[in-house]
Image (cartoon, rainbow, N blue to C red):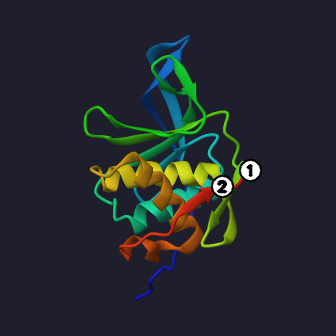
C-alpha cells in the first residue's frame, strides 16, 4: 500500500468566491473575494504572497486553531472612519463559514521594523507581526492589547518556546 507524501509548503489551487464585509467611501458594504489558494483550513484571496501563506498556515497550526476555517484577504481595515495601516481585522463570517482575517491592502510584505530584545537587534516583517497578533487574539481572547503586540514580536524573534515562559523580556522599537 503506497502512502503519498505531501510537501510541507504545498498550496492547493482553489477557485471559490466568498462574501466578506468591505468598505466603499467609508460605508460598510459586502465584497466578493476570489479565494484562489487553500492550505489545510486556511484559504487565501488573490494578492496574498506565498511567504505570508506559509507563515499564516504555520501560525494557525502552532496555535492549534484547527477547528475553524480562516480566510485571509487584503482590503481596507478601518476603525470608525479612520483607515489603519498597522492593524489586521478578524471577524466571523455569517453561517459559520469561518473567520475572515483582513490585512491592510497598502501594507507591503517587505515593510520591516527593527526591535531591540535583550540587547540584540531583530528585523521583523510588520505584516507577520500583525497577522500573528490577530491569531493570538483569537486563541487567547482575554489578554491585554499590549500583550498581543509584544508576544508577537517575541515569537518571531525568539521562537514559539516563548509562549511557555512566564517572565517575558522587554521589547523596544528601534526603527
Depth check: give the residue in front, 17 or 91: 91
Is residue 36 shown above or below 54?
above
| Residue 167: percent from left, percent from top | 40, 73
> Mark 1 and mark 2: span between their CA atoms?
7 Å
Is residue 7 shown to the viewer in this render?
no
Is residue 40 shown above or below 111?
below
Is residue 53 shown to the viewer in this render?
yes
Mark 1: give few (<14), some (14-19) or many (20+) Cα within 10 Å: few
Q: Residue at x 33, y 60 (%)?
A: 66
Is residue 44 toward the left or the right of residue 61 in the image?
Answer: right
| Residue 75: percent from left, percent from top | 57, 31
Mark 2: give few (<14), some (14-19) or many (20+) Cα within 10 Å: some
Is residue 43 toward the left or the right of residue 48 in the image?
Answer: left
Which residue matches tag 2? 125
Which residue matches tag 1? 110
In the picture, the disc for residue 12 is none
Is residue 26 toward the left or the right of residue 95 in the image?
Answer: right
Q: Residue at x 59, y 69 (%)?
A: 157
Is residue 45 shown above or below 49?
above
Q: Residue at x 58, y 54 (%)?
A: 128
Depth check: give the residue in front, 155 or 24: 155
Pointer 1 with pointer 2, Cβ within 8 A: yes
| Residue 163: percent from left, percent from top | 40, 70
Q: Quadrant of residue 120?
A: bottom right
Is residue 170 toward the left or the right of residue 114 in the image?
Answer: left
Q: Quadrant of residue 101?
A: top left
| Residue 86: percent from left, percent from top | 58, 39
Q: Mark 2: which secondary structure?
A: strand
Spot the residue most to the bottom.
1
Amino acid at each position: 500500500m503506497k502512502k503519498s507524501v505531501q510537501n510541507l509548503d504545498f498550496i492547493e489551487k482553489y477557485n471559490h468566491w466568498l462574501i466578506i464585509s468591505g468598505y466603499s467611501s467609508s460605508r460598510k458594504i459586502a465584497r466578493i473575494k476570489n479565494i484562489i489558494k487553500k492550505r489545510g483550513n486556511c484559504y487565501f484571496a488573490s494578492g496574498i504572497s506565498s511567504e505570508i501563506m506559509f507563515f499564516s498556515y504555520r501560525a494557525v497550526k502552532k496555535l492549534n486553531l484547527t477547528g475553524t476555517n480562516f480566510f485571509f484577504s487584503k482590503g481596507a481595515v478601518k476603525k470608525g472612519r479612520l483607515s489603519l495601516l498597522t492593524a489586521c481585522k478578524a471577524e466571523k463570517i455569517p453561517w459559520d463559514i469561518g473567520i475572515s482575517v483582513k490585512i491592510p491592502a497598502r501594507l507591503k510584505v517587505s515593510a520591516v521594523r527593527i526591535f531591540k530584545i535583550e540587547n540584540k537587534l531583530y528585523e521583523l516583517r510588520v505584516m507577520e507581526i500583525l497577522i500573528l497578533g490577530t491569531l493570538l487574539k483569537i486563541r487567547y481572547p482575554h489578554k491585554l492589547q499590549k500583550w498581543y503586540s509584544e508576544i508577537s514580536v517575541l515569537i518571531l524573534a525568539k521562537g514559539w518556546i516563548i509562549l511557555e515562559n512566564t517572565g517575558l523580556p522587554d521589547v523596544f522599537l528601534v526603527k
